[in-house]
Amino acid sequence: MRHLLFAIVLICATPTFAGDLEPRAGWVVIKTDKAHTALTADLKNAVKAHKMGVVTQASPTATARNRGIDIPENRVIGVFNNDFAVKILATSTAAMIEAPIRFYITENTDGSATLAYKIPSKVFAPYYNEGGDALKNLVAELDRTFTGIAQDAIR
């Protein structure tokens, strides 16, 4: 009986994770056959090819492992450039709180990786009244740029 109780405690104490990232409203979610490390490298190359910059990066995976917790690979990569920043600021100061737009690379249960991002036009929509058509036009360009980056990264 003691062994059964111990097994139950171990199962309950083991972290569980939500699983593979699924499509959701306002996001682009692309499951790939690539491994997490390959998709991360390909994304960074695609960002550069589209004249954007990697502004931020964050991943809890290595730190969690240092704490003895094994979690699937994941990385958030913030992407933007100063040209868009200056132009957006000319339309709405408040809108810049949304920059950089983030790509999210997650490791799937089968070892492949998923690339996801929030669609820029959805992210910036709350500022359209303030920024008007100028902001909408800039964000439409961001939509095209992020689509191009994603498509190049998953090839």
Image: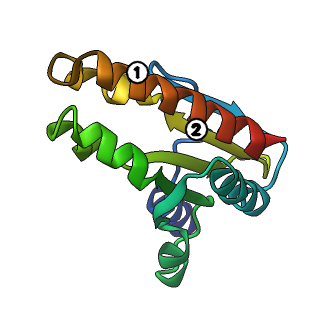
- Relative horizontal placement of residue 111, taking residue 2 as reference (left or right): right
Question: Which amino acid lies under the numbered mark 2 shown in the image of this protein?
Answer: Ala
Q: Nearer the viewer, residue 32 or 14?
A: 32
Packing grade of label 2 (10 A; few <14, some 14-19, many >=20) is: many
Closer to the camera in the image, 82 or 107? 82
| Residue 36, quarter of picture | bottom right
Q: Residue 33, image x and y in percent?
A: 84, 43
Say whether residue 103 is left or right of residue 44: left
At label 1, which amino acid type do we have?
A: Asn
Residue 60 pos. (x, y %): 47, 67
The first of marks 1 and 2 along the sequence is 2
Quarter the C terminus occupies? top right
Q: How many marks?
A: 2
Q: Is residue 107 above or below residue 147?
A: below
Where is 122 relative to 84, above or below?
Answer: above
* 86 sits left or right of 10 in the view: left
Tell me the residue at 52%/72% (across/down). 69
Residue that badge 1 annotates: 137
What residue is shown at x 52% (from left), y 42% (from top)? Answer: 18
Q: Vertical placement of 111 versus 27: above or below?
A: below
Q: Residue at x 15, y 23 (%)?
A: 130
Disc 1 to disc 2, C-alpha distance: 23 Å
Q: Residues within 10 Å of mark 1 (few under 14, many from 20)?
A: few
Determine which quarter of the picture holds residue 133: top left
Callout 2 secondary element: strand
Expressed as whole percent of the image width and height from the top left, the position of residue 70 reads 58, 69
Determine which residue is flagged by label 2.
Answer: 116
Question: In x, y percent, where is residue 117?
Answer: 52, 37
Give the number of the mark in front: 1 or 2.
1
